[in-house]
Amino acid sequence: MPSPPNLQQEGRRAPEEPAGVDPDEPAVGKTVIIGLGNRYLGDDGIGIRVAEELRQRDLGAGVVVRTHQTFDLWLFSEYSGASGLIIIDALRSGSPPGTVTEYIVTPRPDIMTSILGLHSLGLHDLVDFASRMGLLNCPVIIVGIEPNACAVGEGLSPELEKAVPQVIARVFGKLGRSTTS
């Protein structure tokens, strides 16, 4: 028996979207900035924190800012038709805490031969899979910030708090804009 439409729709919405943010605003033809993380796990909330800051700025009509706790395959269908995705997340690179790194994700030339399970896919695997399924046909940039501590508790470590302006400047640069304009 199919689920009632209201249950399906509610399951698709990110519960962390604040009032005044339209989760149904179309992403077609727009650059979508996605802040990933959990604000209740310390530095894991960096993506959410940066997204909240970006919402306070004029990014232009061609940009949509969203937040999500996880990144699943359904998000690619949600953002199908976007002109680009910029994902902001705490990522371990082995660098000192607060280090900002950037990755441009491109589909792998080899065909994925085995998948252990959808819960074990990394971000690159998800992008690759979505590209092969035709769900994603735009550039994907990941801005990663090396976390210090992702333990239970609210708030960022001092190292990540200091990195927020740098991440914002990086996103503005990707949008072809200056943070001062």
Image: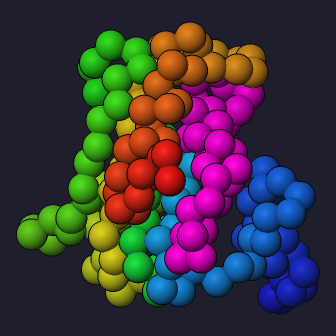
The spot of residue 113 in percent (x, y) is 19, 66
Q: Is residue 13 magenta?
A: no
Up-down relation of residue 42 to residue 133 (above or below): above
The tally of labels here is: 0
Q: Position of residue 25 (x, y in %)?
A: 71, 79
Residue situated furthest front in the rendering: 181
Q: Is residue 44 magenta?
A: yes
Q: Which residues are magenta?
A: 38-66
Identify which residue is drawn at 28% across, 80% down.
132
Identity of the residue furthest to the left in this view: 109
Residue lying at 50% horizontally and 32% vertically, measured from the top left: 165
Task: From the top left corner, tell me how far across and down residue 3 is, in percent.
Answer: 84, 82
Q: Residue 174, how many percent across, how many down?
A: 35, 57
Of residues 55 and 116, the one drawn nearer to the viewer in this rendering: 55
Residue in the picture at 42% in, 20% down = 98
* Identity of the residue drawn at 30% across and 35% down: 101
Look at the image and tell me whether residue 74 can be seen. Answer: no
Closer to the camera in the image, 130 or 18: 18
Q: Quadrant of residue 139?
A: bottom left
- Answer left or right for 37 relative to 30: right
